[in-house]
Image (cartoon, rainbow, N blue to C red):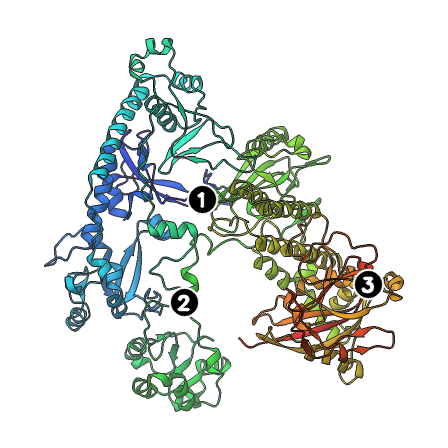
Amino acid sequence: MDIELPFMAEYARTGRASCKGCKSTIPKDDLRIAVMVQESMYMYIGVRITHTYLYMQSTFHDAKIPNWFHKNCFFQKQRPSSVGDIQNYENLRFIDQKDLADSIDNFEQICETNSKKKRKGDSGPLKDFGIEYAKSGRASCRGCEQKISKDTIRVRKTVYDTEVGMKYGGQPLWHHLECFAQLRSELGWLDSGENMTGFSSLKIEDQREVSRVMPKIKSEELPQTKKIKMETTEDDTDQKIMKKLENENITLFKFRDKLKTEVKKVDIERLLILNNQEPVIGDTEKLLDQAADLLTFGAIEPCPECGGSQFIFNKFGYLCNGNITEWTKCANLLTKPNRKACKIPDELISMYLFLGSVKKKTMARTIQYIPPSESTISRNLNVKRANENIDGPKVIRKKPALYNLTFSHIGMKHKEKDLKTRIQRLGGQFESKISENTIAIVSTENEVNRNSQRMLTAKKFGIHVIPIDYFDSVESDADGALNYINSMSLCNWGTDLSKKVPQDEVKSLKSKSIYTKSAPTSKTLKVKNGMAVDPDSGLDDVAHVYSRGKDKYNVVLGLTDIQQNKNSFYKLQLLEADKKSKYWIFRSWGRIGTTIGNSKLEEFSSIAEAINKFEQVYVDKTGNEFEKRNTFVKKAGRMYPIDVQYEEDSPTLNHIDYSLKSNLETSVQNLMKLIFDVDSMKSTMLEFHIDLDKMPLGKLSLQQVQSAYTVAANIFDLIKSGSTTSKLVDASNRFYTLIPHNFGVKSPPLIETIEQVESLVHMLDSLAEIEVAYNFIKSEDLSDNKNPLDKHYSQLKTNLEPLNRSSEEFSILENYVKNTHASTHTSYELEVVDVFKVARQGEARRYKPFKKLHNRKLLWHGSRLTNFVGILSHGLKIAPPEAPPTGYMFGKGIYFADMVSKSANYCCTSQQNSTGLMLLSEVALGDMMELTSAKYITKLPKNKHSCFGRGRTMPNPQESFIRKDGVEIPFGKAVTDENLKSSLLYNEYIVYDIAQVNVQYLFRMEFKYKY
C-alpha cells in the first residue's frame, strides 16, 4: 500500500480555487497547500417532489480530495510536523521547499519556547492550548478517559493530525487539570499554567490551583528527549547534497517555465513520444514535470517489470505508472533508472530555441528522502504510536464517587440548584426527568408515602429513593456510593444497582473513524418483477427496474485496490415509473462500510435516452459494453460486476411467531431456534468482515463463491512458490472485489500468509452453509398455520430424538466427553446440555456398503453453529476441488478426532457466545494409512480406506467400549505414548468418501470458559 500523505503542495493551476481559510481566491501559479480530506455521502439538498429526490452531484468517490489554502492561511489551521508529510513537495521550486521547511521548523521551536511572561496575541502553537470550565459533562478526558464533570476545570490541546483535526482545522482534546499536568511534556506545554489562554477567566481560587499544579518546567526538569532539540549541524556532505539539489532544481524549472510559457501541449507530447516516454494524460502540471525531467536528466528506459514507459517522480524516486495486470498497478520504484540522452529533432529546436541548450548526455537525479512523520506512518499502518498506551488510559485517576451516575429528585425543587452542583462536584449527573437510567431519586419519606405521579414512575422503573443525607455519607466514603443507596433507601422497591451502572465506552470510540460511525445498515427491499429498486433513490414506491427481454438494467460494481487504499462500490439502475412513461437513472457510489460517497438521480424524457445514458455510464465505469457483459473482460483501473441477486426480504424473517403450538419436544425447539438464528448468521458474516449491505444474506451466488475459492487457491500457490508482492496484491484485489469486505477506512490487508488463506477458506465454507440455512427460511410457506420451528425442522429431513439423561446410552456418551478432554485445552470445560440421536434421510442407505467394513469408530466432529443447518440437511462434505489445499494436513477429506476438545476447538465459541454443537459419527475406517506428520493426500493407496494421523496422546485403548454392532467408542481416559515420535499431539482420522460417515449423535454443549 502506498503511504497516504495528509497534505499536498503545488502551484495553483487556475485562479478559481478559494482558500478554505480566508475564503478569497488563490491566484494562478501561487504556491498553495492542501489538507487531504474524505467527503461524506448523501449530501441531500432538495425536497421530495412527486417521489423524486434531488441530490447534490459529487465527483467524490472512494478517494481523498484537497482542501486548498494560501500558504500563510494553511499554517493558521494546520500543524504539519515534517515536510515528509507533504505530497509533491519534491516537485516544488527549491526556494519554496526551503520556505516550507523553515515554516515547520519555526512552529516546532515555538512549541518548545518557555515564555517569561504572557504575550497578547500569541499565534500558532500557543493558541493550541486553553483552559476553561467544562460547558457540559459530555467530554471525556484524553488522559484518564473519564468524563469531565460540568463546571470543573478542563485543559485543551488542539491537534491537527486526526481525521477531525485535518478536516476541520483542528480538534480540541480535553483533559482534567491534573491529567494534563501529568502529560504536559508529551503534549508540548512547558510554560506555567498562568500563561495559558483562558487563565484570567477562572475564579481566583482556581487560578491558584492551576498555578500550583502547573508551574513552569525548568530546563533541568525536562525529560531527556525534550532537552535534546532535533537540530543537526549540516556537515560538508549534507551541504554538498543540498547545493546539488538546488542546482538541479534551478535547471529543471528553467526548462519547465519555458515549456509552460512557450511550447504547445501537442509538441510537448510529441517530444516525449519521440523519446519513448508515454505522456501523462489529463494532468498538465504532471506532464510539464515529466517533460522537464526528460530535458534535464534524459529519457528513462522502459520498466523492467511491466514494460511501461511512464514514470512519475515522487519523494521516493521514479514510480512506474503502468499495470502489472488488469487488477493491479505496477509498483516498481526506481531511484536510479537507466536513461538515454534526450533526442530533440531539429524541427522542434528551430521552433523553440531553448531546446538547443539541452545536453546530449544523461544525469542521475539527486533524491533527498524525507520520511513522513510518526503519526502519518502509524495512521497508514493502522498501529498505535509509541506514546499511546494500548492497554488502558495514559493517566490512572481514581473515579469520583458518583462517576457516571444519574440522579433526579421529587419534592426538592427549592434545593435543586444546590443539589445539582453537589452531584456534579462528586462526578455525577443531575436530570429533572426520571428515566430507567436514573440510579436514584433524592426525596423524603413523606414524598414516598404521598405516591405522586413522579413517585409512581420511579416505582415502575425500580429506582431507589434516598435522603439528601446520602451525599454526606458519600463525601466521607467515596467507595460506598452504591452500598449507601441500598442501605439508606426510603422505599420498599429497587432493582439491582450493578446492572444500572453505565459502562464507559470512551476507549472503543477512540479507535473509530468519523466516516464509519453512521454507516448505513442493510435496507428492506421491495421487489417488482424480480428486481429491487434501491430505497435511496426515493422511487421504490412508484417505479421498478427496467428490463427488456433478458436485459435487466441493474448492476452492482466493485473495485478493491490495496495499493491505493480503495474499497469502492458503484450501483447503477435504470428505473421506469409504474404508471406513467417516466424514466430515471439512479447511481450511488462510495467506500464500502462507510459514509464516504454520494448518489445522483437523473430523469429522462424517453427510454432510448435513458438506455443510452445507462450504457454510457457502464462503459465509463467498466470499460466494457453493457450488451457484451456476459463476456466481461476486466480493464485496468476499472470496476468489476458483483453477482448479487436482490430479492424481497422474506416476511418470515421479520415476523417470526413462535406462539403457535409446536409438535416438537422443547429441547428440539430450542435447537431449531439456535441453528436458524438469522442474527447469529449475520454476526458470523460480520466476524469475517463481510459487508452485509453489498453482500446480504441470501443474495450470494454459487458462481461468486466458486470464483472466490479459485482465487484463494491461486493465492495459496503464489505464497508457496515465493511469488512477488505485486502478484499477491493482484490476487488479493480480485478476492476482495468478488466478496465485498467492510474494512471501514482502513486499508484492505494484503493476503500474504497461509494462515490468512485458511481463514478465507473457513469464511467461504461458512458463507455457503449460511446460504443454505437462510434460503430454507425464505422458502417456507407462510400460508399454513404451523409453528416456524416445525417448518425449520421439516426442512432438515433429519430425525432428531432427545436422549433421556438417565439412560445408559447417555451415560456412555457423557463419559466420552469427560474422559477425552485434552490436558492442553484448559481454557474451558464442556458441559453436556442435550444429546440428540440423529437419523439423516438417506444416509443409512448410503452408508450400508461400509457397515460391513472392519474398524468402525464413533468419532467427534466440531463446527460453527451457523454450519449445522447445512450439515444436518446435506451431511458432512469434502472441500470443493476449487478450494485451496491449505488447512488440510492430510488432504481434502472429512476430519474426526477421538479427543472431544480437539474437535470442540472448531466450534469457534467464545465467552460471549458459549454454546456449541458437536457431532458423534460412526466412521468406517477399515485399513488405515498411518502417518505421524503432515502429508497432503490426493489419493489413498489401493489397499487403504482412510488416513490415521497418530498422536502421542489418545484415549486408553484398553478402556474402549465396543457396541453390540461392533462399533468402538474410544472413551478411555487419556494416555500418552512417550516413546512415539510424532509431530501430532492427538489422533486424527480422515476419510475421503462421504459415504463412509454416518452421523449418529448431536451434542449441545456449553463451553464454560475459565479465562
Residue identified by numbered label 1: 45
- Residue at the image position 38 percent from the left and 78 percent from the top: 407
Q: Nearer the viewer, mark 3 or mark 2?
A: 3
In terms of sequence position, does the residue under pointer 3 or pointer 2 come before the other?
Answer: 2
Q: Nearer the viewer, residue 813 or 187?
A: 813
Q: Is residue 404 above or below residue 165?
A: below
- Circles 1 and 3, Cβ within 8 Å, touching? The answer is no
Q: Is residue 10 above or below residue 972?
A: above
- Quarter of the image for residue 131 reads bottom left
Q: Is residue 690 visible?
A: no
How far apart marks 3 and 2 lie (CA) works out to 53 Å
In terms of sequence position, does the residue under pointer 1 or pointer 3 come before the other?
Answer: 1
In terms of sequence position, does the residue under pointer 2 or pointer 1 come before the other?
Answer: 1
Q: Amino acid at mark 2?
A: Asp
Residue identified by numbered label 2: 391
Q: Secondary structure at mark 1?
A: loop
